[in-house]
């Protein structure tokens, strides 16, 4: 059974940094794109960042560009999200996701086949 397990969420002050990890098990995703989404209270889930299978190509939402960095370690079947200069607006549940096939769409939630349970990130002012 495929599982994506996020870790690293927590409480941080505005301007601070936090790192998230997502470990996959049950199958390898080394050939497929993986990404992060987030959902703030009262809002729809939105795309944050994605990384292609090799880790060479990365994609970011405009709201996090320059502050967040996504990376992956295929040997560990794990992706990471380093979040710097965090703002109160970054408060959300962060979800790891994986595509189960080669797809051209990067940010579409519906193109991701596997999801983690989410980890809470809270940024205080």
Image (tube, rainbow, N blue to C red):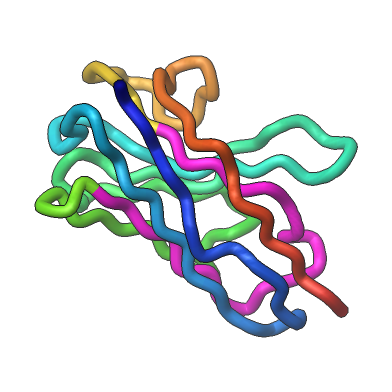
Query: Residue 17: which quarter of the image?
Result: bottom right
Observer-nearest of 70 and 58 = 70
Q: Is residue 22 left or right of residue 37?
A: left
Query: Residue 15: which quarter of the image?
Result: bottom right
In this rendering, the answer to whether 104 lies above or below 75 is: above
Q: For the N terminus, which image quadrant?
A: top left
Report if residue 85 lies within the magenta region: yes
Q: Magenta region's main secondary structure?
A: strand
Residue plotted at (56% across, 37% down): 117
Residue plotted at (23% across, 29% down): 26
Observer-nearest of 116 and 35 = 116
Q: Is residue 8 left or right of residue 74?
A: right
In this rendering, the answer to whether 88 lies above or below 117 is: below
In this rendering, the answer to whether 43 lies above or below 56 is: above
Report if residue 71 lies within the magenta region: no
Q: Is residue 33 left or right of residue 88?
A: left
In this rendering, the answer to whether 75 lies above or below 82 is: above
Residue plotted at (39% across, 50% down): 22
Q: Residue 55, position in %: x, y?
A: 21, 51
Count of labels in the image: 0
Residue extending furthest front?
1
Q: Residue 86, position in %: x, y?
A: 67, 73
Magenta residue span: 78-97
Q: For the C terminus, which image quadrant?
A: bottom right
Query: Residue 32: which quarter of the image?
Result: top left
Residue plotted at (17% across, 53% down): 76
Observer-nearest of 25 and 74 = 25
Q: Residue 122, position in %: x, y?
A: 75, 65
């Amino acid at each position: 059974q495929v599982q994506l397990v996020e870790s690293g969420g927590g409480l941080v002050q505005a301007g601070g940094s936090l790192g998230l990890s997502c470990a996959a098990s049950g199958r390898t995703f080394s050939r497929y794109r993986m990404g992060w989404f987030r959902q703030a209270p009262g809002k729809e889930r939105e795309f944050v960042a994605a990384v292609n299978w090799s880790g060479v190509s990365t994609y970011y939402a405009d709201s996090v560009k320059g502050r967040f960095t996504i990376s992956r370690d295929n040997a560990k079947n794990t992706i990471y999200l380093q979040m710097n200069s965090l703002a109160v607006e970054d408060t959300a549940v962060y979800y790891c996701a994986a595509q189960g096939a080669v797809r051209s769409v990067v940010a579409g939630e519906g193109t991701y086949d596997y999801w983690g349970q989410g980890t809470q990130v809270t940024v205080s002012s």
